[in-house]
Amino acid sequence: MLKKLILEGLHRNLEHSSGAKANLDGRLCFDVMLSELASSKRSAYDKGCAKLLTCEGGWTAAIAAERGYEVDPSCCLCGGPLDTPWHRLVECPCVEDQRKAVIPADVLAILRDAPTEEQKRAALTGVFRHPADEAARPLELPAGQVIAMDWLTPEVYKQLDDLPACCRNYFIDGSRYEHTIKEWDRASWGLVVVAPDGSVLFTCGGAVPRSLPQTSQAGEYCGMYAASRLPPGFTFTDCASVEHSWNHRGLLGQVDLSPDSVYSGIVAKAQAGQGIEAMFKVRSHLDPSDEGITMAEAWLRHGNEEADAAAKRSQCYHPAISEAEYADANLLMRIARAFVDAASCVYALWPRLDLSGVKWSQPTLLLHPPRRRLVE
């Protein structure tokens, strides 16, 4: 956990540093470009163009002239006054057909009408102000509290305790809503009590708190902790890590607590409860109505399916991100992705700028000053 937090802190510092260089009071979001670089659908050339955009590495005639080289700053294709990255990607009429083939019409119309500074930044660099800075964050709980426990009232506990032992079958599952912007990932957990005849006797769930990774695995561990707070019963999970954490015992018969595991603390706290008499691994996301399976297998699949549905419904326990925030971020992501396609398509249509033998003098004013080096 400490290693993960240090790495996240390092990434945040780099995002803040990049934002400061862009004269922002917040961070820059690189998640879209990182997803493009990790995509198997992108060719090596596409990924190179994505890096070129993000690093502002397009060396155009106008930029060379700003840097003191005595070259004609006009566009060599259309004769426009300035050969800038914006001219190449948005304005030059000589590559309009290629541009329209890869940039959606509504995105191009926005950028040619009255684009905001963030929309321009997304088009030219693929990055933009981090939307998670102002949006709602995952659920926050008091220190030391693993999950929200307001669902476990004395009445609920007595209701479950009064059930026959054969009816206390706890199916747990975790769910994750994954977003390109990683800080908008949200995880939740679900627990259902299933009787031998398949009827669901009780359902609960909750959000994975901010202190834990927003992953479905974290949801499974939260579900395990919830089950440990209930009257003794059998627990079923489709997560091999949870089952191994509980059933892999050492020489003293204690639950194995690895210092390398993010969830060792949750396992230790769950061990202090009495709700888990035994932990069983079940297969996930299988249809209980399949032909040729036994009644026991159909019952296990049904329980896992109900727990999965409970976990998905529990996403609502996180503070909500507004639809307007989602819409603004999605537009910026569409712009960034479209202009990776545009750079891949149109940049190669300009001849490579040859500066060999070109006279250079120290410029007095730079419209686009070079970035400061991280190490002087």
Image (cartoon, rainbow, N blue to C red):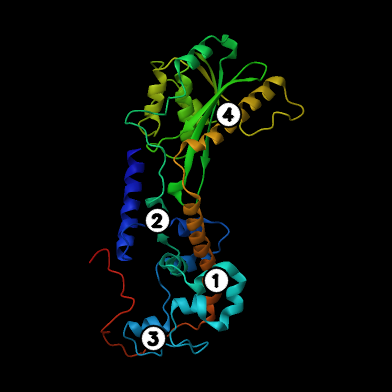
Which comes before the other along the chain, label 1 or label 2?
A: 1
**Nearer to me, 248 or 331:** 331
Of the 4 image quadrants, the one containing the N terminus is: top left
Q: Are discs 3 and 2 less than 8 Å apart at CB?
A: no
Cα separation, mark 4 vs mark 3, equals: 65 Å
Which amino acid is tagged 4? Ala
Q: Residue furthest right?
A: 291
Q: Secondary structure at mark 4?
A: helix
Which amino acid is tagged 1? Leu
Q: Residue at x 55, y 67 (%)?
A: 107
The residue identified by callout 2 is 130
Which comes before the other along the chain, label 4 or label 2?
A: 2
**Nearer to me, 343 or 175:** 175
Q: Which mark is residue 355?
A: 3
Q: Is residue 215 left or right of residue 202?
A: left
The residue identified by callout 4 is 307
Give the class, few, some or many, for how many residues have Cα within 10 Å of label 3's Cα (few <14, many ≥20). Answer: few
Cα separation, mark 4 vs mark 2, equals: 34 Å
The residue identified by callout 1 is 108
Which amino acid is tagged 3? Leu
Which comes before the other along the chain, label 4 or label 3?
A: 4
- Asked if one can make out residue 255 in the rendered structure from this viewpoint, the answer is no
Which amino acid is tagged 2? His
**Image mark count:** 4
